Image (cartoon, coloured by chain):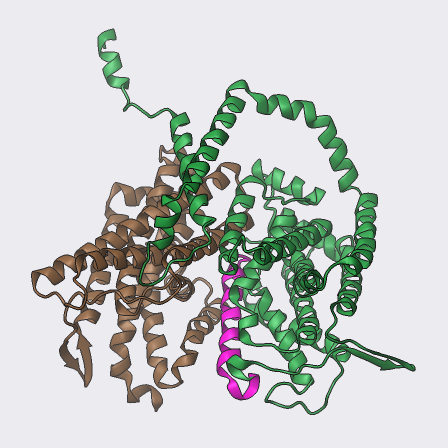
């Protein structure tokens, strides 16, 4: 069997990619929960995080030298926070400039979607124009050694950093959404925006906060992804679509569903590499998406943000 | 509570006057435009080249000044309440204008004038502009007219539209033996046209069926994914599609029946007339379709899907039909394009092209045939001219397209020349009545 042969070698990269997909998918699912909008421009929030992380770490690291010890930790955290903050800023501005005027007009969903597409195209090509259209590597922030081997598969520092950070952020988000007042507001708007506003929830503020939270996670994912592969003005496109597929797989509007869907999709994608040549890997996500839509359109964990999160 | 305590209780943080915030917005916009209109491009070794040169040049002052002037004019406009004065004064003229342009007679008059102009004017243009007309304007007007059925009439968002264009083009390549994989028989491009229409129709149905049974907005992402798959297939399946090189030597159109012989060649004008004839047929058909039972069903679905279903309109069937009609129009254009250019490769059909065609439809006015034709013609002809004059880099055109989409959606979502019905629907939607699209869940349940 081709699946079992290299299973462990592909499992760890799968979980690494999957935890990144999960972080992005949360951004899609949060916005879909409160606005019923596929926020296509979220992939550009992700790209912004990558570029911000790139510039920050380039400024910190002396070229050619791999930092170690406390420096590594400090630089990684700075890059991560920088990516997250810039991602959040772009997401916030996006909502303010592009979506809020539409919401005031009660525009049809088609109009929202077209705006999102336009914003995505604009942002990615603006980045391409400003920062060049070639792939750039984020400088190494730590020696990427093998930590341990798992059934013959090597596990490296970078993979552990990515998985660990992603898991920590997801746990934090889950707590925020389920326990805090902010989370209660988000859940209320997702359940029924009109009633929520009658109960004194400031809808505009909650929507802004939702975009900011999604932007924080997306931007951080952009930095992690950029350090795992590279930074590019179109780096958001494919991970964006895949993360959306992951969000649908888990049940759109459902945060835990997005986490589960992201992890599952990353693993499936990576493990299926042992059965087909790697050029066809990108097809897997779409096939999964279409299969889910055909057989279980509500996703694995069901749809509503308000009810199931 | 004494009176003295009250101000404490209601004191709010001091807010900046919104006028200054607006000024800030205009200045930022000016700086952004200054960067966007720069003709340089950043490099991996110097990421800040564009920002530095654009914001360090004297051009910046001009843009900031322009922003400030626009802001001042708008503030005066707002303070004096000129908006209501002007709209009151021009209401009569505008009503008359809408009456004239919205009517059926004006519709046919415009199409007639456009047809005559399309036949006469290209004769007097230089070879370069003739080539722009055929390779850009004609191809994309044809595509936009097809996409208008999906976006404008059925209210669905199709982001994989150009994938069907590619399928049509590769179908032409296959049946003219230009691809590595050989067909059992060789066909004339004219015969391939209906074949490509059927192929794309089936592909459209296969793709639309699983998604359109659910929510309309899933179609957007699924079609985007479909386009990516088609791209991957074209690039990676070397022994079928020729990979990145694509296919060469697709023959031109030719007629050889009933003793009439004609062979299209590299010359632009004959192809221009072929495209125009095809466009005329399509415009006539689609215009009939718009006012037929099918078109009325699309309108019903757009305006209120639940009510339409309650009145016996099979919504899924009509959505699928619109999607498939759009797909087959795209395929038809693909055959024409492949035969005109003579070679095709995956790079001719990038994902961004689907969004570009969408922007033509939006810019012109979705749902209005005249608007879509004008929009597509303008947005293909002008960039070609700008590029020729070296005003805009070719790589920056997607950026401008994106900006146009966002600005259009915020300020004039009905487009340049809207259809009367569509304008009314968008107006109603603003008041909370009807949807003006077909993006919600199907009321018939998951079939």
Residue interval drawn in magenta: B215-241
The front one of A212 and B261 is: B261
Q: Is residue B16 above or below residue A202?
A: above
Where's residue B353, x and y in %? Answer: 56, 63
Residue visible at 55% across and 57% down in the picture? B216
Q: Look at the magenta stretch and give its main secondary structure.
A: helix
Residue visible at 72% across and 78% down in the picture? B195
Chain A tint in image: brown
Where's residue B439, x and y in %? Answer: 56, 54
Residue visible at 19% across and 86% down in the picture? A152
Question: Which quadrant, please, contains the N terminus of chain A?
Answer: bottom left
Q: Which chain is green?
A: B
Residue visible at 54% across and 18% down in the picture? B80
Question: Which quadrant, please, contains the C terminus of chain A?
Answer: bottom left
Residue B292: image quadrant is bottom right
Q: Is residue A283 above or below residue B386?
A: below
Where's residue B45, x and y in %? Answer: 31, 62
């Amino acid at each position: 069997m081709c699946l079992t042969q290299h299973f462990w070698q592909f499992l760890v990269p799968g979980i690494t990619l999957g935890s990144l997909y999960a972080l992005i998918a949360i951004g899609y699912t949060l916005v879909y929960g409160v606005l019923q909008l596929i926020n296509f421009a979220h992939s550009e929030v992700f790209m912004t995080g990558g570029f911000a992380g790139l510039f920050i770490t380039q400024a910190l690291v002396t070229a050619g030298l791999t930092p170690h010890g406390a420096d590594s930790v400090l630089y990684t955290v700075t890059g991560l926070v920088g990516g997250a903050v810039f991602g959040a800023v772009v997401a916030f501005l996006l909502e303010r400039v592009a979506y809020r005027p539409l919401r005031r007009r009660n525009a049809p969903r088609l109009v929202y979607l077209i705006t999102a597409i336009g914003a995505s195209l604009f942002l990615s090509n603006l980045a391409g124009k400003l920062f060049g259209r070639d792939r750039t590597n984020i400088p190494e922030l730590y020696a990427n050694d093998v930590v341990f081997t798992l059934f013959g598969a090597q596990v490296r520092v970078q993979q552990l950093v990515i998985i660990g950070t992603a898991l920590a952020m997801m746990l934090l988000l889950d707590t925020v959404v389920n326990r805090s007042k902010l989370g209660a507001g988000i859940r209320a708007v997702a359940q029924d925006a009109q009633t929520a506003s009658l109960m004194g929830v400031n809808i505009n503020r909650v929507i802004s906060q939702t975009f900011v939270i999604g932007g924080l996670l997306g931007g951080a994912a952009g930095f992690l992804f950029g350090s795992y592969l590279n930074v590019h003005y179109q780096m958001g496109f494919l991970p964006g679509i895949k993360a959306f597929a992951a969000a649908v797989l888990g049940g759109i509007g459902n945060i835990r569903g997005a986490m589960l869907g992201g992890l599952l999709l990353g693993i499936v994608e990576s493990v299926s590499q042992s059965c087909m040549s790697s050029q066809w890997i990108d097809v897997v996500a779409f096939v999964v998406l279409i299969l889910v839509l055909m057989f279980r359109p509500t996703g694995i964990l069901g749809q509503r943000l308000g009810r199931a999160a | 509570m004494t009176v003295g305590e009250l101000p404490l209780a209601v004191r709010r943080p001091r807010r900046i006057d919104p006028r200054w915030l607006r000024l800030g917005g205009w200045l930022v916009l000016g700086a952004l435009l200054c960067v966007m209109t720069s003709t340089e491009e950043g490099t991996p070794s110097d990421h800040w080249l564009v920002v530095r040169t654009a914001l360090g040049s004297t051009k910046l002052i001009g843009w900031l000044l322009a922003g400030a002037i626009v802001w001042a004019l708008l503030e005066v406009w707002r303070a004096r309440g000129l908006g209501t004065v002007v709209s009151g004064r021009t209401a009569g003229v505008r009503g008359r204008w809408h009456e004239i342009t919205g009517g059926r007679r004006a519709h046919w008059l415009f199409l007639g004038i456009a047809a005559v102009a399309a036949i006469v004017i290209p004769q007097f243009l230089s070879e370069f502009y003739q080539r722009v007309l055929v390779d850009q304007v004609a191809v994309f007007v044809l595509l936009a007219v097809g996409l208008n059925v999906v976006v404008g009439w059925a209210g669905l968002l199709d982001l994989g539209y150009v994938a069907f264009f590619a399928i049509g083009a590769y179908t032409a390549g296959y049946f003219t033996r230009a691809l590595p994989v050989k067909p059992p028989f060789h066909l004339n491009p004219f015969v391939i046209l209906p074949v490509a229409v059927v192929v794309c129709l089936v592909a459209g149905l296969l793709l639309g069926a699983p998604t359109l049974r659910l929510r309309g907005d899933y179609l957007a992402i699924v079609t985007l994914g479909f386009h990516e798959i088609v791209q991957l297939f074209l690039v990676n399946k070397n022994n079928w599609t020729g990979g990145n090189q694509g296919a060469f030597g697709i023959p031109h159109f030719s007629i050889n029946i009933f003793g009439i012989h004609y062979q299209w060649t590299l010359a632009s004008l004959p192809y221009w007339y072929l495209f125009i004839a095809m466009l005329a047929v399509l415009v006539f058909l689609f215009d009939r379709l718009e006012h037929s039972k099918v078109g009325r069903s699309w309108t019903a679905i757009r305006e209120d899907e639940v009510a339409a279903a309650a009145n016996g309109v099979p919504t899924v069937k009509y959505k699928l039909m619109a999607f498939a009609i759009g797909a087959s129009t795209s395929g038809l254009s693909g055959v024409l394009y492949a035969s005109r250019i003579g070679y095709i490769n995956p790079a001719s059909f990038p994902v961004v092209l689907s969004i570009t065609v969408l922007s033509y439809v939006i810019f012109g006015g979705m749902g209005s045939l005249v608007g879509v034709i004008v929009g597509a013609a303008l947005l293909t002809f002008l960039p070609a001219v700008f590029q020729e004059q070296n005003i805009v880099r070719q790589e920056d055109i997607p950026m401008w397209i994106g900006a146009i989409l966002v600005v259009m959606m915020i300020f004039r979502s009905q487009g340049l020349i809207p259809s009367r019905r569509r304008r009314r629907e968008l107006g109603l939607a603003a008041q909370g009545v009807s949807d003006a699209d077909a993006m919600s869940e199907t009321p018939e349940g998951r079939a």
